[in-house]
Amino acid sequence: SIANPSQSVVAIPSGVHYAMEAFRGGFLVTDGHHNRVLWVNLNGQISELMAFGNIVPTGLETRGNRIFMAEAGPNPHLPPDGRVVMFTPESSSATPVASGAPLLVDVEYGLGNKMYALAQGIFPVGADDGSPALPNTGSLVEVNEDGSVTVLASALDRPTSLEFIGNSAYIVTLTGEVWKIDDVSDPPFGVSP
């Protein structure tokens, strides 16, 4: 990001690179501080794929030509600002898919083409930008067709990323723990560290 500076005024010239996702023979990178998604080819060339307003882009998922991105939203990261959006390399803007969870940090597809998102949780009142959510306020949510979300597991401790293997969700926390939630599409859920 220092070699490819943002066009907006920023406090951290190097940016805050949050997620990386393989895409079209290279990879996408979200920059949560510069509010953009970068495209990096395997030769190391970097270009800005999409720039946003103050939405704090976080996690990524791709399906074909479509890019899905989680947005934490601006400080104080309120639930309506926690959104999943979709765009393509040809898009001029992102299309909202769903919203309603505080401080969204990732989005992933699970079995059966169901989309899920991970919310870090409630942001502390008055905290500085970049601060984590309050402990044990995170959640795993299912993205509904009507643009809403349904909480599947709550009281997660500051989750940061999500991945599915089969019907199990694996969640990495800010403290470095890996949590497994079994049978995600078949409640009740078994959450274990």
Image (cartoon, rainbow, N blue to C red):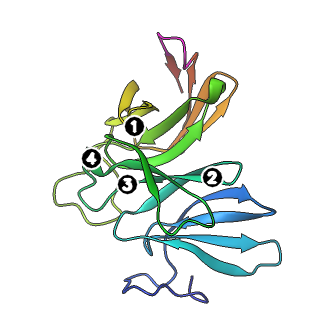
The x, y position of residue 152, in whole percent, is 42, 23
Which residue has dot 3 on it? Answer: 72
Residue at 69% over, 54% down: 65
Q: State yes or no: discs 3 and 2 in contact (Cβ < 8 Å).
A: no
Residue at 57% over, 29% down: 114
21 or 158: nearer the viewer: 21
Q: Amino acid at mark 3?
A: Ala
Give the structural element (helix, strand or loop) at label 4: helix
Which residue has dot 1 on it? Answer: 157
The x, y position of residue 150, in whole percent, is 37, 27
Q: Is residue 186 magenta?
A: yes
- Please identify, in this view, whether the residue under mark 1 or under mark 2 is nearer the observer: 2
Q: Residues within 10 Å of mark 2 (few under 14, many from 20)?
A: some
CA–CA distance between discs 3 and 2? 20 Å
Q: Which mark is residue 66?
A: 2
Of mark 1 and mark 4, the one earlier in the sequence is 4
Magenta range: 184-189
Which residue has dot 4 on it? Answer: 80
CA–CA distance between discs 2 and 4? 23 Å
The x, y position of residue 44, in whole percent, is 77, 78
